[in-house]
Amino acid sequence: MYLARIDGTLTTAKKHGTLQGVRFLIGQRLEPDGSASGEPLVIIDRLGARRGSTVVVSTDGDIARQWLGNNTPARLMTVGIVDQVHMDGN
């Protein structure tokens, strides 16, 4: 799991049958200091995350398969919307 900032949504003309009605988000993975890391990713969402939200992303495809069926190609999925992040200072 990791944190990501939601930068937008993605609309498709055609998609895998298991993904009908599923909302796609564009998310940017975040480092512990809040800086962006890597390339933007497509994340499926059923929690209603909005642009600018920080979300918890699961990389475990089992959660997506439980929701969408065993043959879904989806893997990255929002599992939480973050209110605040607290880190202990060193």
Image (tube, rainbow, N blue to C red):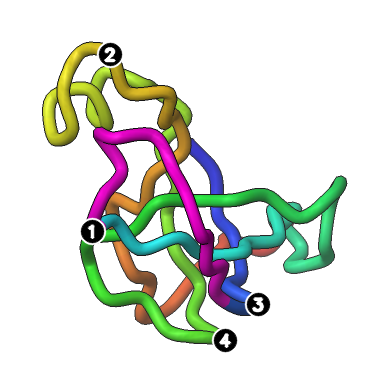
Residue under the image location 45 percent in, 60 percent down: 24
Please identify, in this view, whether the residue under mark 2 or under mark 3 is nearer the observer.
Answer: 2
Q: Is residue 74 magenta?
A: no
Main secondary structure of the magenta stretch: loop
Q: Which residue is mark 2?
A: 71
Separation of marks 1 and 3 at Cα, in angstroms = 20 Å
Q: Is residue 58 above or below residue 80?
A: above
Mark 4–mark 2 CB contact (< 8 Å): no
The amino acid type of the residue labelled 3 equals Asp
Q: Give residue 31's position: percent from left, percent from top.
A: 75, 53
Query: What secondary structure is found at the residue carrying circle 1?
Result: loop
What's the amino acid at mark 2? Asn
- Is 32 situated above or below 2? below
Picture coordinates of residue 5 (x, y %)? 61, 70
Is 7 located above or below residue 40 in the figure? Answer: below
Q: Residue at x 40, y 51 (%)?
A: 44
Residue 77: where, in percent of width, then height? 38, 44
Q: Is residue 16 magenta?
A: yes
Q: Quadrant of the C terminus?
A: bottom right
> Which residue is under mark 1?
21
Asked which quadrant contains residue 19, the reply is: top left
| Labels 4, 2: front one | 2
Please state which of the two labelled residues, at mark 4 or mark 3, is closer to the viewer: 3
Q: Name which of mark 1 and mark 4 comes first in the sequence.
A: 1
**Within 10 angstroms of label 3, few (less than 14), some, or many (20 or more) residues?**
some
Q: Looking at the picture, which amino acid does disc 4 mark?
A: Gly
Label of residue 52 in the image: 4
Residue that badge 3 annotates: 7
Q: CA distance from mark 4 to mark 3?
A: 6 Å
The crowding category of the residue bearing disc 2, from other C-alpha atoms within 10 Å (few below 14, some 14 to 19, many at least 20), is few
Earlier in the chain: of badge 1 and badge 3, it is: 3
